Amino acid sequence: MSKIFNFLFFTAFYFGSIFPSDIEFEADKTLFDTKNELLLLEGNVSLKVENLLFKADQVTLDNKNKVFSSEKISFSSLDDFLYGQTKFVSISENETIMKDVEFSSCPCEDKIWWVESKELKFLKSNETLSAKKSKLKVQGRTLAYLNSANFPVSAKRKSGILLPEISINERSGLDVKIPVYLNLKENLDLTLEPRLMTQRGYGLTNQLRYLGKSYEGYFNSSFLKDDESSFKILETDDLRWSYNFFHEQKFKNSIFLNFDISSSGDPFYLSDLGSFLSGLSRTYILPQKINLEFFSRNLKIKTDLNSFKLTNPLAKNQFQRLPGLQFNYFVNKDNLNFHIDMDFAYFNKGGAFRNDDKQNLLRINLKPEISHAFAKNNYFLKTNLSFNYSYQDFDTQSLSRFLPILNLEQSLKFYKKTESSKFFVEPFLNLAVSDQKKIVNKVKVDSGLKLSSINESQTFGDLFLSYQKDIDVGAKFSLFGSEKSKLNIKLSKLYTIGTKKLFYENLKIDFPDPFSLKVDYRVNKRLHFLSKISIDNDNNFSSYKNTFSFDSTGYRLSLRHNLIKNIQIYDLAETSLYKKEINSLEFTAALNFFENWSGGFKFIHDVEQEKNVSNVFSIDYENDGLIVGFAYMKTLELDWVSILENDSFKDYHKDRIRLFFELKGLGSIGRPKENYLRRRSL
């Protein structure tokens, strides 16, 4: 027993004299050569050094040179993110050095890509591997030579240079972005992205992110020294910029604070050359708002400072809400519901690039509402009575309006079930009646009027719809089959007794009485047909949208037709209004050619002009360790359907080539083809 104790004590003492106490080792057999000061470890040898684990069948440790060596030593990080093998390892108190190394972070079983380095140095202070004289090899071929480079030891984010994004297009020439990631703290990081365009200039984008227990947010900014702006006639400043600050914070469980503040130096920057990393999507509106909200079981109180900029350079000024206060109280008892909504706000004018008119307005909206729901057997009736009150003080002129509205929603539900299907029928008849007064918008609160879905709301902005006697009649049909098929059909027709008009500035708008049809048919989650049709006597309100898609294991196909008549468009070049008709066919396909090869294409064809206005083609190769992709795009005009459906627009280019290359576990260059094949992605 004493011999075993002396052996274990001597082993621990000898090994501890070579390596620090924070290094752990295991082996089936241990032999000593005291003359040459060598320690031989045999059988399932493992050595743990900080975040690295070394394994070998036989290891010789040299106490004189503080080196252990073997014909083959494998190593990996503790989370298996990084792995490799080496012949020699030198371990000191502060660093670990490996010679003649092969390593990779590829999440693949086969040896698809790896790095060969003459030397790898692991510094415990920053938990990174510093490589010297390295080769990046992909499937046995040398892809790049690296004199020096840093690699992370684990999947945790580490500071360093990310792989660049490279593109070529007709406006910017060669466009190169090289992101640099800085891990400042565990809950704080910063990404800097220098950008160089051979035909334009240079710029810098940054993204600062932070995270706490009860808060999170980011600050993004972007600037560009642009020598050849696409809109040089209108924008003469070469230094262009944008920023976006977003913050969310919770106090206890009922108080919430939100910031969303953004701006741009000129209206064209985001659509022209703004980076996606700037956080400002290509939209019509740049938000500038601060909200403080309180929630309880039946009460909500919100105060806000709310403003925005319009990226449309010729848009009229919107009003800034500085400040505003909202009050919402509601109570439910049995089938009776009561709630009261109040909005108090002080507005002043601003937020546009071209118009600085100064106007002030005080506005109070008050809407108490009571409703009752009645259901018996298959009959449902909901009665809703609301009282809309509006008070406005504008340029020392006061104006108040009062409008009661009665809504009746009633439907019958029929249900039938068989062994193979379920069938539902729900006819409905809805009534809406308001006070018969003609209200003219004498006080201009909104500079633009958006007419959204038909008959969904009785107010638009601060405008009441008066003289309203609407009848909406229709039916819903649903059929569920046993083979995972589903069919939904909705038919409706809106009737107006008399006339319903809205006066805005010098315009008189007649509201439509459309017939609407919606068909949604699915089979086995593969076949999907969707049709939306709205027909009115006046073609200004008619639209037709039909989509057919088919998903299979080897391919995805989609065909869509859009017909929307008489859209008013402002022509920037001719400074005039004209009517545009959208009549387009869109065909999209994503295909898997072979085991590792896939591709896709998309065409948008203008039926009226008889030409393709958008073409996309892409192909890529993917295995367990890498992806290589190519995409070509050619577009001739803005995506009008996206503008109408999403209130956002994407930039377009006459020609653009994109390359995508990703070593899995290491990083990527460019963007994958899926970003371009998805609808409304150009």
Image (cartoon, rainbow, N blue to C red):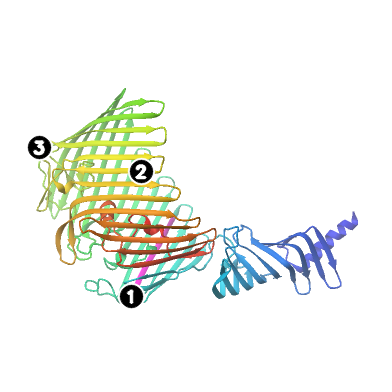
Residue 61 showing in the rendered view: yes
Residue 503: % across, % down: 11, 48
The answer to which of marks 2 and 1 sits earlier in the sequence is 1
Residue lying furthest front: 594
Quarter the N terminus occupies: bottom right
Residue lying furthest top: 377
Q: In front: mark 2 or mark 1?
A: 2
Quarter the C terminus occupies: bottom left
Q: Could you tell me the amino acid type at mark 2?
A: His
The residue labelled by disc 2 is 528
Residues under labels 2 and 1: Cα distance? Answer: 45 Å
Question: Which region of the structure is painted magenta?
Answer: 216-225
Residue 328: % across, % down: 30, 41
**Callout 2: 10 Å neighbours few (<14), some, many (20+)?**
some
Q: Could you tell me the amino acid type at mark 3?
A: Gly
The residue labelled by disc 3 is 498
Residue 521: % across, % down: 34, 39
The residue labelled by disc 1 is 200
Residue shown at 34% from the left, 29% from the top: 423
How many callouts does the rendering have?
A: 3
Task: Name the residue nearer the viewer: 453 or 680.
Answer: 680
Q: In front: mark 3 or mark 1?
A: 1
Q: In front: mark 2 or mark 3?
A: 2
Q: Secondary structure under badge 1?
A: loop
